[in-house]
Amino acid sequence: MKNFLKIKNLSISVDDKCIIKDLNLNINKGEVHALMGPNGCGKSTLSNVLAGKEGYDITNGKISFSGENLLKFSPNERANKGIFLAFQYPVEIPGVTNINFIKTALESNRQYNGLDPLKPGDFLKLIKEKAELLGISDEYLKRQLNVGFSGGEKKRNEALQLMMLEPSLAILDETDSGLDVDAFKIVADAVNSTRGKKNSMLIITHYQRLLERIQPDIVHVFINGSIIESGGPELAEEIDKNGYERFNNA
Amino acid sequence: MAMKDSTMPNFLNIKNFDKSFDDLSSLSQLREEAFLNLKDIGIPSKKFERWKYNDLKNDIRNIEFSLCKTSIKIKKNKLDKFEINEIDYFKKNKNHYLQPLKYLKDEGVVNLNLSYSNLFKVLTIKKDLKKPIIVDIKSEGHGMSFPRILINIYNNVNAEIQFLNRGGLGFINQITEINIGKNSSVKISRLNESSSIHSETFFSNLGRNSEINLKNLSIPKNKSRFQVFNSFIDEYSSAQFKSVSIPYENSKDDFLVHNNHLSSNCKSDVGMRSILGKETESSFQALIDVENKIKNSRADQDCRAILLDEKASMNAKPEMKIYNNDVICKHGTTIGSLNQDHIFYLNSRGLNKFEAEKILLQGIISEYISEDSPLINFLPEKYK
Ligand SMILES: Nc1ncnc2c1ncn2[C@@H]1O[C@H](COP(=O)(O)OP(=O)(O)OP(=O)(O)O)[C@@H](O)[C@H]1O
Ligand SMILES: [Mg+2]
């Protein structure tokens, strides 16, 4: 599908401060886009707005997803329609068991889409399979959601949820940050394996090395709330070598 | 004596009450003594420090002054042997009758119960229990009832007891006392589902190296008060009180927990989790007393209330009377709504508002009521 996600002239403010400025971005089904930009340029703000977080003023523009006006849907409707945000800073939720949470999420998702819940045995088999792929042990499934998880463990857990929920648009907000060398490869390869014709990805990262493992179709350079240049993977290589200097001066 | 309390004339028919208890005459002198205290103190209202959030006097004003039907059933495992006595126990042990006054003399509801107690169960547990004892207290209809439960646990005994408080449309004023011997431990699960105006005063007296662990699930359908007084009679004893309170709409749930560190090297730990929906109210007073000479005490308090509605309210008041430096205290109180970042995280995975709230509240409840707790079956449907 063309223009699976279509962002048109989007401007967003927080507390009267304009963070996203006249942003345009189109992602077709099956495409992987990378978004690179310096700290504070508005990448997480954009991700949060796509996921439906409150507290942002959308002062101008439109977002459509799969042909529908995305902005009219609540966060859970967006999730059930296929949008998944792997958070830069996942929250810790005491008292909620990781595996129960993922099960509830999957059930909500299946119910919304008219599917029967998985049989308990099938669910268990599936989650163990995905967890193993990501190097997550059973113990972490039984623990409270992200509570006391290290930075890297939280990121792996985000990847696990992504793999369980199989979204049609995955937004990865610096999922690679905080992972050690080995974990980085494991998570990147696992995420890359979910790639297909029916799903798209928006990968936010500071590092070109992630894009070596998950090769993007298009790389966007995001400065001060707008995309100022788009190109192929070579753009990421350039940023990796020379930083954002050329773009800042543009 | 001048009548200080306008509710009191109702209670002057003590003779009428006694008629239903011909066999109580040998205790009538003790009952009169409590009654004189009661006349002096009056029924609790907000003017008493311990009752500052609760006006019992006003609440029970319109309750019929007659006895309502209450039963206390003791369910036990066949293999477990322990004694069950009733009023005859106090006839033989007269000095036990007014024992609660030794720890708390100036309390209206205690003196009220001692004046009129109409239902007694005394359990004497001398050996470990294989299974929990269930004490099922049920009331029916209007009117009042004054049950009293005394549990004596011998030395070196491990026991588990479940209390179920249910029913009624009047006023239930209960005393529960547990005397715990040396090296003994008791695990208590208490359910309060009372539909009466309910007041329970709970005393534990802890012997050397003994332990009480009380888990409470309170889902009152009316006004409810649970006050707990733990006395550390000897060293190395510990008391844990963990309560989940989820009052029904238009209900009120009040708590007071007093840990009296009378001996050195004792530990108390008090925690409250309140989930307050539409038109509900709760209060929590946590008191710690540590006298001058007492060494190496540990006293923790922690209260968390979730307000789910604008018309819900919580009063929490931790209070410490600590007269020396040899105490480690941890305390915290948070009152507020659910964490919006948590809700958003759950929403972003597809859970709707209701599901997200449910899973978060279940998480809070599960801190105190674990999956293997007998209380879990009594949780309101939407938190199961
Ligand atoms: N709720 C908020 N209140 C005030 N300022 C905000 C808020 N959210 C974001 N900002 C500001 O908006 C700007 C963009 O923040 P954002 O988190 O989107 O940056 P980012 O591109 O993700 O940065 P990083 O690479 O460090 O993750 C920052 O200057 C930030 O301080
Ligand atoms: Mg960010």
Image: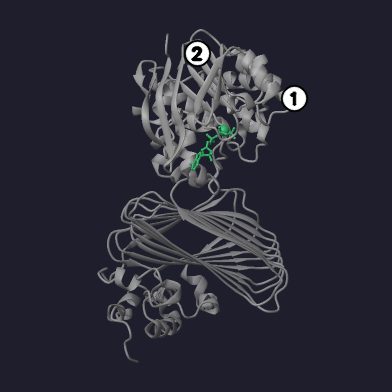
Q: Residue A60 appears in which quarter of the rendering?
A: top left
A79 shown above or below B23:
above
Question: x and y percent of residue B188 in the render?
Answer: 55, 55
Q: Amino acid at mark 2?
A: Asn
Q: Return the disc, 2 or 1, that comes first in the chain's sequence.
A: 1
Quadrant of the snapshot with the N terminus of chain A: top left
Q: Give residue B35's position: percent from left, percent from top.
A: 40, 82
Residue A133 appears in view? no
Q: Residue at x 32, y 91 (%)?
A: B2
Residue B77: horizontal and vertical position, in percent?
Answer: 55, 48
Dot 2 beta carbon under 8 Å from ligand 2: no
Q: Residues within 10 Å of mark 2 (few under 14, many from 20)?
A: many
Chain of the residue displaying label 1? A
Camera-side residue: B331 or A205?
A: A205
The residue wearing badge 2 is A199
Asked whether B88 or B119 is in front, the reply is B119
Q: Quadrant location of residue B43?
A: bottom left
Q: Position of residue B46 (x, y in %)?
A: 37, 74
Q: Are discs 2 and 1 located on one and the same chain?
A: yes
User: What residue is shown with label 1?
Assistant: A181
Q: Farthest residue in the front direction?
A: A249
| Rendered view: A67 above or below A19 | above
- Label 2 SS: loop
User: Which residue does the image show at 69% across and 23% down from the upper left?
Assistant: A242
Quadrant location of the C terminus of chain A? top right
Q: State the colouring used for the structure image.
A: one colour
Quadrant field for ligand 2: top right
Would you say the residues marked 2 and 1 are in contact, meaning their CB atoms lie under 8 Å apart?
A: no
Q: Amino acid at mark 1?
A: Val
